[in-house]
Image (spheres, coloured by chain):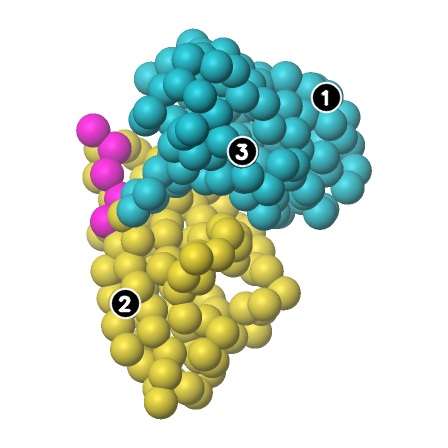
Chain colours: A yellow, B cyan
């Protein structure tokens, strides 16, 4: 069955960096767009980045453009989100999701930015 | 594209219908003929999951009491008979121009 498992979250100081991983299984990774979406505690969903199936297109929300980088490794069936210069406003649960329609989601990983 | 959902919350008696509206800042009809509007449910403590894609198609495993309708900029999610497992927050999302979500509609049981 389709599975997406996020990891790499944790506590980081403002200005710090973190790399999230989304390991997938149960489908052909190279066939699907992949996205990262985040959700601050008690708030709504915010899309932040996606990458095309063949890695030729990447898009970011204005809130993370220039600080976050999305990438993928076909050999490892993994999606990544490199997050630099983190601020307290980046504190959230981060989800990866599959496909244009975000048909499958992982369970999320919590990123806390605090001094 | 700004997505606006109404109501902010609703309280429904089990077995009764429910309806959520979603309006987009511009038409979500693509030149490929598809309408890039999606509906999700996030149950308490869980990840969101897809209910409806391309405006009106039910995703795999979604009960037929859920239906999506609308076109252009105005869309509706309807639940014909609300059940206890339908409690949570409902989001609409557009995928025509990158992605953006509505602010969510919280459904609770009376």
Residue A7 location, quadrant: bottom left
Up the image or down, B65 lies above or below A26; here it is above
Location of residue B80 in the rendering, given as x and y in whole percent from the top left corner:
49, 12
Q: CA distance from mark 3 to mark 1?
A: 23 Å
Q: Earlier in the sequence, mark 3 or mark 1?
A: 3
Residue B81 location, quadrant: top left
Is residue A30 visible in this depiction of the protein?
Answer: no
Direction from residue B38 to residue A73 in the image, left or right: left
Which numbered dot is residue B10?
Answer: 3
Helix, strand or loop for disc 3: strand
Which numbered dot is residue A9?
Answer: 2
Helix, strand or loop for disc 1: strand
Residue drawn 35% across and 38% down? B43
Residue B95 or A51: which is nearer the viewer? Answer: B95
The segment highlighted magenta reads A1-5
Q: Residues within 10 Å of mark 1 (few under 14, many from 20)?
A: some
Asked if badges 1 and 2 are on one and the same chain, I answer no
Location of residue B36 in the rendering, given as x and y in whole percent from the top left corner:
62, 30
Residue drawn 49% across and 74% down? A89
Residue A99 or B24: which is nearer the viewer? Answer: B24
Q: Chain of mark 1?
A: B
Q: Provide the residue designation for mark 1.
A: B71
* Residue A85 among those drawn in magenta: no
Foreground: disc 3 or disc 1? 3
């Amino acid at each position: 069955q389709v599975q997406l498992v996020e990891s790499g979250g944790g506590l980081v100081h403002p200005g710090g960096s973190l790399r999230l991983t989304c390991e997938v299984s149960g489908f052909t990774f190279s066939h699907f767009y992949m996205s990262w979406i985040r959700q601050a505690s008690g708030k709504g969903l915010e899309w932040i980045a996606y990458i095309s199936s063949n890695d030729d297109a990447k898009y970011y929300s204005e809130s993370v453009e220039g600080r976050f980088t999305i990438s993928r490794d076909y050999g490892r069936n993994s999606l990544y989100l490199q997050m630099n210069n983190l601020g307290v406003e980046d504190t959230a649960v981060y989800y990866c999701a599959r496909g244009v329609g975000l048909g499958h989601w992982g369970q999320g990983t919590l990123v806390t930015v605090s001094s | 594209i700004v997505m606006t959902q109404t109501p902010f919350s609703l309280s429904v008696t089990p077995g009764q219908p429910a309806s959520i509206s979603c309006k987009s800042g511009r038409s979500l009809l693509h030149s490929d003929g598809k309408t890039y509007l999606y509906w999700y449910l996030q149950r308490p403590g869980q990840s969101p999951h897809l209910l409806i894609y391309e405006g009106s198609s039910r995703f795999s495993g979604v009960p037929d009491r859920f239906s999506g309708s609308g076109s252009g900029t105005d869309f509706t999610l309807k639940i014909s008979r609300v059940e206890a497992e339908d409690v949570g927050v409902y989001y609409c999302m557009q995928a025509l121009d990158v992605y953006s979500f509505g602010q969510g509609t919280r459904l609770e049981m009376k």
